[in-house]
Image: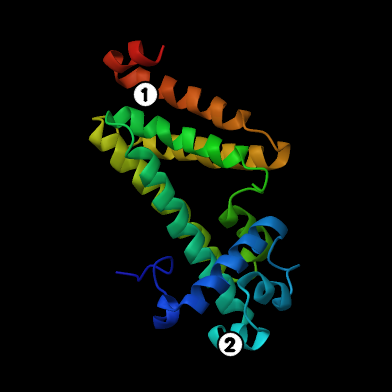
Amino acid sequence: MTLSVLTTAPSSAHSAVYEAIVVSADALFTAEGVPTVPLERVAAGADVSVAAVEEAFPTWHQLVVAALQYRHQDWMAALLRAESAVEHPCDKILTVFSYLEQCFADHSYRGCAFINGYGELGRIDPLVARLADEHLQQCEQHIAMLCDAAELPTHLAPALTLLLQGAQVEAAVHRAVQPARTARRAAAMLIAVYDQTYSAKVA
């Protein structure tokens, strides 16, 4: 079994300095893109010295990987919290898209970090490409788990994942929340095709 690069982090990941640097890098990379952010701004955002950043991350590449790992774990944790507020498995699926709408409503939203990261670096950096691939796969696996809990065909998961990822791209381009609502309606229609009892609830 191949070790997931999304959940593999150095032992220093538990230090406050390490976490502050990663959070700073994640915010800057998300807002501005990876190639344009200088190390000095990452250090300033973390309220540490450049030397401290270089000690925690001897290479820029290590910092990029750590920021993407953090972004995946933080995104999934927030999604699970949102899903925990509802009980019906079909509602949990639709909550994925409601959570997207919350993300899109944040004026700092600039698109999926993994789609952006792949566009910036993935074609020349195999590890960044693998991180993006794993993130999308784990999102699809999560939705497949929700489909299974709702007694819906698991082959719906790839279609729902396409709605999720497509909404993120369109929201980033148009700077709008509407793609999340459109994707949610489409997801509800797909669910209704296979669950007639639920279709009356979402109509």
Q: Quadrant of the C terminus?
A: top left
Residue 177 % position (x, y): 62, 32
Q: Nearer the viewer, residue 66 or 192?
A: 66
Element type at mark 2? loop
Residue 106 % position (x, y): 62, 42
Element type at mark 1? helix
Q: Nearer the viewer, residue 18 or 141?
A: 18
Compared to residue 10, the image places residue 101 above or below, namely: above
Residue at point 60% right, 31% down? 179
Is disc 1 in contact with disc 2, using a CB cutoff of under 8 Å? no
| Discs 1/2, front | 2
- The answer to whether one can see residue 127 in this image is no
Earlier in the chain: of badge 1 and badge 2, it is: 2
Residues packed near mark 1 inside 10 Å, few (<14), some (14 to 19) or many (20 plus): many
Q: Which mark is residue 153?
A: none
Residue 111 % position (x, y): 63, 48
- The answer to whether one can see residue 105 in this image is yes
Q: Which residue was labeled with disc 2?
A: 58
Q: Quadrant of residue 26?
A: bottom right
Compared to residue 71, the image places residue 16 above or below, namely: below
By what rule are the colours in the image chosen?
rainbow
Residue at point 54% right, 71% down? 20
Q: Which residue was labeled with disc 1?
A: 191
Q: Quadrant of the N terminus?
A: bottom left
Residues packed near mark 2 inside 10 Å, few (<14), some (14 to 19) or many (20 plus): few
**Extreme residue in the front direction:** 47
Compared to residue 139, the image places residue 161 above or below, namely: above
Tell me the CA gap for discs 1 and 2: 48 Å
Residue 198 % position (x, y): 31, 17
Q: Nearer the viewer, residue 124 or 146?
A: 146
User: Label 2 amino acid?
Assistant: Pro
